[in-house]
Image (cartoon, rainbow, N blue to C red):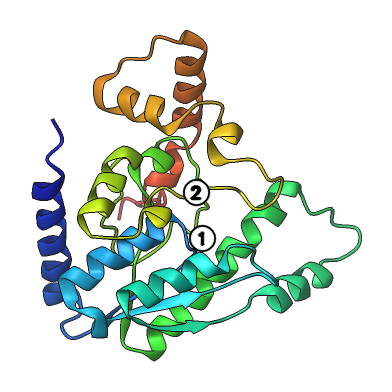
Amino acid sequence: MFDAMKVKDACVQWIRDFFEENGKGCNAVVGISGGKDSSIAAALCVEALGKDRVIGVLMPQGVQHDIDMAQLLVDHLQIRHCVVNIKETVDAILRAFPEDLALSDQSRINLPPRIRMSTLYAVSQSVNGRVVNTCNLSEDWVGYSTRYGDAAGDFSPMCNLTVTEVKQIGRLLGLPDVLVDKVPIDGLCGKTDEENLGFSYAELDVYIRTGVMEDLDKKALIDRKHKANLFKLQLMPSFVPEI
């Protein structure tokens, strides 16, 4: 029942309205990884604002094996872009940690996305920009994002769209199939996102939209991940004194 064309057109208009109200004449700044989410987010911004107002930032950490996909995207959209390699910055922070402070594996995993977001904001403030959040509903639902990393941004065009829906919109935007269908890999252990999660995005998307999940073990896993990561989707709790 998903009307991809209707939603795509509404999202494009929403982006235009956002910039009219929150940055008239500003540029959209998007981190380009070569994956489907950043590709589709960038393409939506190009349709909304024109290619001259979209700036891509490629941020490899040393040598990125699929950097050619990021280059393919910026070439296809014909947008301005720059490359900022974050390896030296990440390494410097890791070296600066005291020897008696054991850095957890999760901290090591989340550090590069947070450095990338800091880089995006440095670029954005230098080019009169607004940073695009590239998260989708499926990943957000189970917490597959880094708080203050890829989960940050100034506006979020796809956070209420599932992976299945985002990919349908990507095809309407005329992106190369290799970008829309690219299987996301975490870049650390070589496993796909779905292998790490324990269920497919197709299964998750159906569950999100219908509440139906025949595999009770997967349902319990999804529910557990969703509950544990709800804090990522909420504003920071703040104390309100009685004055």
Give the answer, above or below, for where 37 lies relative to 29: above
Say what secondary structure mark 2 lies in: loop
Residue type at tag 1: Gly
> Residue 160, can we see it?
no
Foreground pick, 199 / 130: 199
Percent across and percent down for residue 100 are 91, 58
| For the residues bearing labels 2 and 1, Cβ distance under 8 angstroms | yes
Q: Neighbour class for label 2 at 10 Å: few (<14), some, many (≥20)?
A: some
Q: Is residue 237 left or right of residue 108?
A: left
Between marks 2 and 1, how big is the CA–CA gap? 8 Å
Comparing 185 with 118, the one in front is 185
Image quadrant of residue 46? bottom left
- Residue 115 at x, y = what percent? 59, 69
Which label is found at residue 199?
Answer: none
State the quadrant of the C terminus. bottom left
What residue sits right under mark 1 in the picture? Answer: 149
SS at circle 1: loop
Q: Residues within 10 Å of mark 1 (few under 14, many from 20)?
A: some
In this rendering, position of residue 147 left or right of residue 169: right
User: Tag on residue 145?
Assistant: 2
Residue 48 appears in the rendering: yes
Name the residue located 35 percent from the left edge and 59 percent from the top edge.
176
